[in-house]
Image (tube, rainbow, N blue to C red):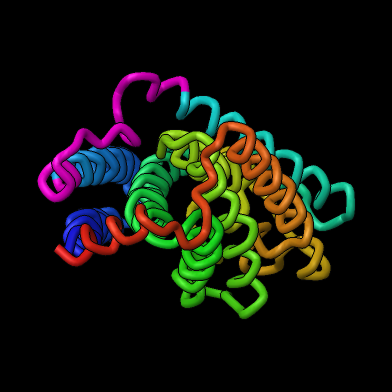
Amino acid sequence: MRLLAQLVAVAVVAIAGSGAVGAVQWNVPLTLVLGVATAVLALVAYAWVVRRTERREPAEVGRNGALAAFGRGALFGFAMFAAVIAAIALSGGYRVDGWGSVGGAIALAGFTAAAAVTEELMFRGVLFRFVEERIGTWPALVLTALLFGMAHMFNPHASLWSTLAIAVEAGGMLGAAYAATRTLWVPIGLHFAWNFAEGGIFGTGVSGQGAPDGLLHGVLSGPTAISGGEFGPEASLFALVAGLVMTGAFLVLARRRGHLVPFRRRAAGVAATATLSR
């Protein structure tokens, strides 16, 4: 099946890259190089397997306009996290206890690049696209958002609340970003900038995972609903609200552009089912 072949191709690169990055234990140059290499190899593997299994050029990761689309996504992601951390700080849940580490920020850039690219390729490039093709945008959005949340449920300090928060604010928003733009570069940029701002700049935990300090040594405190607690700002109500707002904005844009695929298409659905069964 096309779906399985594409998932396996990206997953093999992701697992190998994750193992290599973990083995160097945050060595700055090696983490940066291995993280970026993992991202590039995952993109190459995705493009190759799509050409082989679908007999088409993978326009969703095409080079034309890629930098601009990535930049727009990164701008959205950074602005969104900056707004969230400002709201947490004004509520007494975040403070800066001095400078962190430039080296830590550089290492986190590599780590984040690998995670953002591989996760977007698997969840939006493969799963969302295939489900949408078969049964429509809304079921694809709900299903892949839930799967994305579940993929983070075994992270350190994860809980049912953090899993649901990740599903809604990240899984839903990133799927909606792809639906609105029909390029993976926007959700990749958004995902990268959010995570890098979270750990690499403001020095907070990223989805519960421990990491070196970023540019700032940030400290979260107070109620989990405000700060996100040990899991990090993604478990904060402020992040949930920001994610819902962005999801709504992307879905409105997708509707205006005619990018929403209706639920239970007839002729097209039959054709898609036949294609998936090959």
Between 78 and 258, the one lying in front of the other is 258
Q: Which residues are magenta?
A: 49-68
Between 72 and 229, the one lying in front of the other is 72
- Residue at the outermost left position: 52
**Residue at figure coordinates x 23%, y 54% from the top left:** 10
Between 204 and 85, the one lying in front of the other is 85
Q: Quadrant of the C terminus?
A: bottom left
202 to 88, vertically: above or below: above
Q: Position of residue 107 (x, y in %)?
A: 40, 43
**Residue at figure coordinates x 68%, y 57% from the top left:** 233
**Residue at figure coordinates x 36%, y 45% from the top left:** 117
Left-right relation of 159 to 64: right
237 to 196, vertically: above or below: below
Left-right relation of 195 to 267: right
The answer to if 63 sits in the magenta stretch is: yes
| Residue 171: quadrant of the picture | bottom right
111 to 4, vertically: above or below: above
Q: Is residue 171 visible?
A: no
- Residue at the outermost bottom position: 160
| Residue 251: quadrant of the picture | top right
Q: Is residue 170 visible?
A: yes
Q: Position of residue 254 (x, y in %)?
A: 58, 39
The answer to if 51 sits in the magenta stretch is: yes
The rendered magenta stretch, by its main secondary structure, is classed as: helix
Left-right relation of 125 to 177: left
Q: Position of residue 16 (x, y in %)?
A: 19, 58
166 to 96, vertically: above or below: below
Looking at the rendered structure, the number of numbered marks drawn on it comes to: 0
Left-right relation of 66 to 4: right
Q: Position of residue 98 (x, y in %)?
A: 69, 42
Q: Quadrant of the N terminus?
A: bottom left
